[in-house]
Amino acid sequence: MAAGQNGSGRTQLVPEAHQILDNIKYEIASEFGIPVYQGSEDYWGNISSKDCGRVGGAMVKRMIALAEKELMSGKQLEKL
């Protein structure tokens, strides 16, 4: 597999962030009571699209909040 690509063929902008994003994903799924567990090979085929979307939406909200906090502390965000 080419560097920076995951199994879906998409190129990750920051490959080093994969594990951190996975942790966030499973933390949010747990908060919503969605029965998926880290180490399950990322198989979510038995989870509804609605629930997957809830997790993804919450991840985006959390990442935006983190970026806003960085901006408010005077840090400049890097351009990708």
Image (spheres, rainbow, N blue to C red):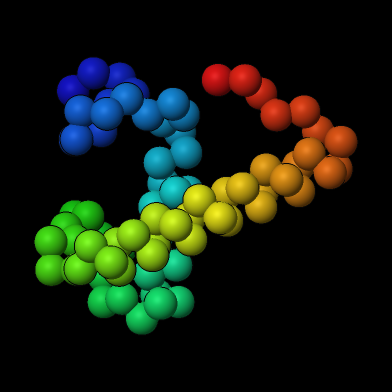
* Left or right, 79 with reference to 48: right
Q: Quadrant of residue 12?
A: top left
Q: Quadrant of residue 7?
A: top left
Rendered location of residue 67, percent (x, y):
67, 43
Rendered location of residue 74, percent (x, y):
87, 36
Residue 17 visible in image: yes
Residue 24 visible in image: no
Q: Quadrant of residue 29?
A: bottom left
* Left or right, 69 with reference to 56: right
Vertical placement of 78 versus 63: above or below?
A: above
- Residue at the spot x=44%, y=49% of the render? 21
- Residue at the spot x=46%, y=29% of the render? 14
From the viewer's side, name the closer residue of 38 and 60.
60
- Residue at the spot x=57%, y=56% of the render? 62
Q: Residue furthest bottom?
A: 33
Q: Quadrant of the N terminus?
A: top left
Q: Residue furthest left?
A: 45
Report how many numbered discs are placed on residues in the image: 0
Rendered location of residue 68, percent (x, y):
73, 45
Q: Residue furthest right?
A: 74
Q: Quadrant of the C terminus?
A: top right
- Residue at the spot x=48%, y=61% of the render? 58
* Left or right, 8 with reference to 65: left
From the viewer's side, name the closer residue of 58 and 11.
58
Q: Residue furthest front?
A: 50
From the viewer's side, name the closer residue of 61 and 38.
61
